[in-house]
């Protein structure tokens, strides 16, 4: 399940634009957190995309 979700996210982000990117990241993180309880153990490339979104929200520096 994890690999399938990660691959779907990578595909969606690849085809995203400035308007859809935040929606894809938010949707992915909500689903991942719901299914697995935390955002731990994300592959580095996915973690970096999620971190970029967190910076936008002011949750990280």
Image: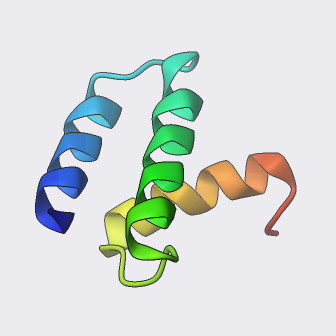
Instruction: Decide which of 21, 3 is in the foreground and name it.
Output: 3
Q: Relative to 45, is 56 on the left or the right?
A: right
Is 41 rendered above or below residue 18?
A: below
Please, which residue is most extreme toward the right here? Answer: 58
The image position of residue 42, as x and y in percent, is 36, 74
Q: Residue at x 60, y 62 (%)?
A: 51
Which residue is found at the position 38% from the left and 22% from the top? 16
User: Which corner quadrant holds the N terminus?
Assistant: bottom left
Residue 20: image location, x then y, percent? 50, 20
Q: In the figure, residue 55 lies in which quadrant?
A: bottom right
Q: Farthest residue in the bottom direction?
A: 41
- Residue located 53% across and 51% down the image: 30
Please state if 8 lies on the left or on the right of 36 as rendered.
left
Above or below, comparing residue 21 to residue 7 in the picture: above
Colouring rule applied to residues = rainbow
Q: Is residue 30 left or right of residue 53?
A: left
Report how many numbered discs are placed on residues in the image.
Answer: 0
Q: Position of residue 39 (x, y in %)?
A: 50, 73
Choose top left, top right, bottom left or bottom right for residue 3. bottom left
Q: 2 or 44: which is nearer to us?
A: 2
Identified at 12% across, 54% down, the residue is 4
| Image coords of residue 28 (percent x, y) | 43, 47
Q: On the rendered image, what quadrant is the C terminus found in?
A: bottom right
């Amino acid at each position: 399940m994890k690999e399938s979700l990660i691959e779907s996210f990578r595909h969606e982000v690849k085809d995203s634009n400035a308007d859809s990117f935040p929606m894809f990241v938010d949707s992915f993180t909500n689903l991942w957190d719901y299914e697995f309880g935390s955002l731990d153990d994300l592959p580095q490339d996915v973690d970096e995309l999620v971190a970029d979104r967190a910076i936008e929200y002011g949750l990280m520096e």
